[in-house]
Image: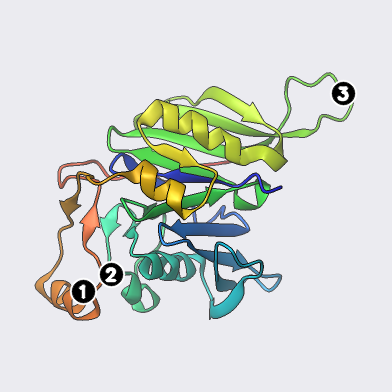
Amino acid sequence: MSRAVTLLTLDAGSVLYNPTRMPKEVVLKHIDGELTKARRTDTDDWLTERREELEVNFWEDGRYNSPTSAVATLADRQAFGFRLNGEAVNPLAIANSAQTAETIEVEGLGRGGIVVEDELQLPIAVFTTEEVYFRISIREDEDSDAEVPGSIALLEKREGPGGDWDKLDRSEPTEAGCLLSTIAEETGMETVSGGADEMRKSIGDEQDSFKASRTREDEEIRERMAIQNDTAFPPSAPKPRPVDFNS
């Protein structure tokens, strides 16, 4: 039985990825039931795949040379918010951008969420509009008395861009998705483990959002190509800092 849990970030924040410490998979789920996945291959390029929630197999529909391009493609297909280094950018322009990616950011808004089942989707971080950070990563079990300690999925929290990380919760790596529920309790986000109907019920009708700052040219491109322009972060909100999963 699947242990997958979907985090609905709503208008409370976003999910962060560090391009230098990407998980093997990034999975997004739309409220219409479609799942899209970016998956790292043995040759270090990235495949994008999709399936409907009642189907069994994912179908490949793209290949990219960087996780940034692959995740941007997923966000665009699901009409999720996408920010690079804290700046709202056109996801279709990523491939031609000379900007160095330090933080990849996805906002589910009212359109869906980010799926975590096990260690394949880790490490991952969450950033709130109140500038609170959460991170989930696989760590050695420091509390184990075994001669060879095993691994755990560890959830930590940090207030603001600096300071120490506080341990918040832990789980078996195969059940890492359950840690998203602790994040939801701390932030006002929601988690669902069911299908699209449950997601739509959890999201509700109203979400506060803002229009991201754009150039006139980008606005014209977005309008022509029907790319959404919403973000949970007001213009005055601090940009997220890259999350280090090694410390």
Label 1 vs label 2: CA separation? 8 Å
Q: For marks 1 and 3, give the CA distance.
A: 55 Å
Q: Amino acid at mark 2?
A: Asn
For mark 2, give the secondary structure.
Answer: loop
Q: Residues within 10 Å of mark 2 (few under 14, many from 20)?
A: many
Task: Give the mark toward the camera: 1 or 3.
Answer: 1
**Residue 143 seen anywhere in this rendered image of the structure:** yes
Task: Identify the image quadrant of residue 236.
Answer: top left
**Upstream in sequence: badge 3 or badge 2:** 2
Report the quarter where the C terminus lies. top right
Farthest right residue in view: 147
Residue 3 in the image: state x and y as whole percent.
Answer: 65, 44
Residue nearest the viewer, comparing 115 with 167 = 115
Instruction: Check the image and report above or below for 149 versus 214.
Output: above
Q: Amino acid at mark 3?
A: Ala
Pick whichever, 216 or 116, lies toward us. 116
Q: Nearer the viewer, mark 1 or mark 2?
A: 1
Cβ–Cβ under 8 Å for marks 1 and 3: no
Which residue in the structure is indicated by mark 1?
A: 222
**Residue 110 in the image: above or below residue 170:** below
Sort mark 1 into few (<14), some (14-19) or many (20+) by Cα contacts within 10 Å: some
Query: In this rendering, would 244 be left or right of 213?
Result: right
Q: Residue at x 56, y 41 (%)?
A: 245
Q: Position of residue 233 (x, y in %)?
A: 23, 45
Say which element carries label 1.
helix
Residue marked by disc 3: 146
Q: Specify whether 41 is left or right of 187.
A: right
> Which residue type does callout 1 highlight?
Arg
Residue designated by label 2: 90
The reply to whether callout 1 and callout 2 are in contact (CB within 8 Å) is yes
**In the current view of this chain or complex, which residue is farthest to the left?**
216
